[in-house]
């Protein structure tokens, strides 16, 4: 498999904690699925900070940033049954990847980590053969 993109992002957890108090921030940045999952958690700051970093790292991995009609809600961060994080993307982003990289088959890898002060995400996109 060939790597077609990678991205990394680190956020200060206090910044996200403050942003969570801003009206409309959660709904503008996170998907309904992510918001629903957060309701069961005690440490919402860590949860949302890692997802924020993942979304930033992902758009860096495709070399776009949040422009060309890409929104935070186009990226959904989920965990599988064992807790491994994954990124699900909207059809809008799939079209951008297809146009930019001339391919339909790829795999997105995501790694998340956090400490008291910071959360970090790393994304790799591999072309499937």
Image (spheres, rainbow, N blue to C red):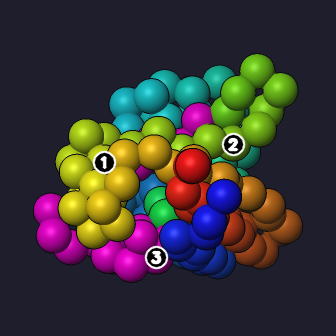
Query: Label 1 crowding class (10 Å Cα cut-off): few <14, some 14-19, many 20+?
Result: some
Quarter of the image holding residue 17?
Answer: bottom right
Residue 111 sits above or below residue 66 on the image: above
Dot 2 or dot 1: first in sequence order is: 2
Q: Position of residue 66 (x, y in %)?
A: 28, 71
Mark 2 lies on a secondary structure that is: strand
- Residue sitting at x 61%, y 69%: 3
Q: Position of residue 50 (x, y in %)?
A: 64, 58
Task: Determine which of the numbered discs, if any, sits on residue 94 in the image.
Answer: 1
Q: Position of residue 103 (x, y in %)?
A: 36, 54
- Residue where numbered disc 3 is placed: 60
Residue 62 sits above or below residue 79 on the image: below
Mark 3 lies on a secondary structure that is: helix
Q: Position of residue 126 (x, y in %)?
A: 59, 59
Query: Label 2 crowding class (10 Å Cα cut-off): few <14, some 14-19, many 20+?
Result: some
Q: Is 64 part of what is drawn in magenta?
A: yes
The stretch of residues the image draws in magenta is: 59-78
Judge by depth and name the residue closer to the eye, 122 or 35: 122
Are the residues at dot 3 and dot 1 in contact (C-beta closer than 8 Å)?
A: no
- Residue where numbered disc 2 is placed: 85
Judge by depth and name the residue closer to the eye, 129 or 54: 129
Disc 3 to disc 1, how far (Cα)? 15 Å
Quarter of the image holding residue 67?
Answer: bottom left
Residue 40 placement, left or right of 127: right
Disc 2 to disc 1, how far (Cα)? 19 Å
- Residue sitting at x 67%, y 67%: 122
> Is residue 126 something one can see in this rendering?
yes
> Is residue 29 something one can see in this rendering?
no
Q: Is 68 part of what is drawn in magenta?
A: yes
Residue 32 placement, left or right of 47: left
Residue at the far left: name it. 69
Task: Determine which of the numbered discs, if any, sits on residue 27 in the image.
Answer: none
């Amino acid at each position: 498999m060939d790597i077609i993109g990678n991205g990394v992002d680190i956020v200060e957890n206090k910044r996200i904690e403050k942003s969570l108090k801003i009206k409309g921030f959660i709904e503008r940045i996170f998907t309904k699925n992510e918001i629903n999952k957060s309701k069961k958690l005690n440490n919402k700051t860590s949860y949302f900070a890692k997802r924020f970093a993942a979304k930033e790292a992902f758009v860096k991995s495709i070399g776009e940033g949040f422009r060309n009609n890409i929104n935070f809600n186009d990226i959904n961060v989920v965990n599988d049954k064992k807790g491994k994080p994954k990124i699900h993307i909207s059809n809008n982003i799939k079209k951008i990847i297809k146009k930019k990289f001339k391919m339909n088959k790829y795999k997105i890898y995501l790694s998340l980590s956090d400490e008291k002060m910071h959360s970090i995400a790393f994304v790799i996109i591999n072309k499937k053969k």
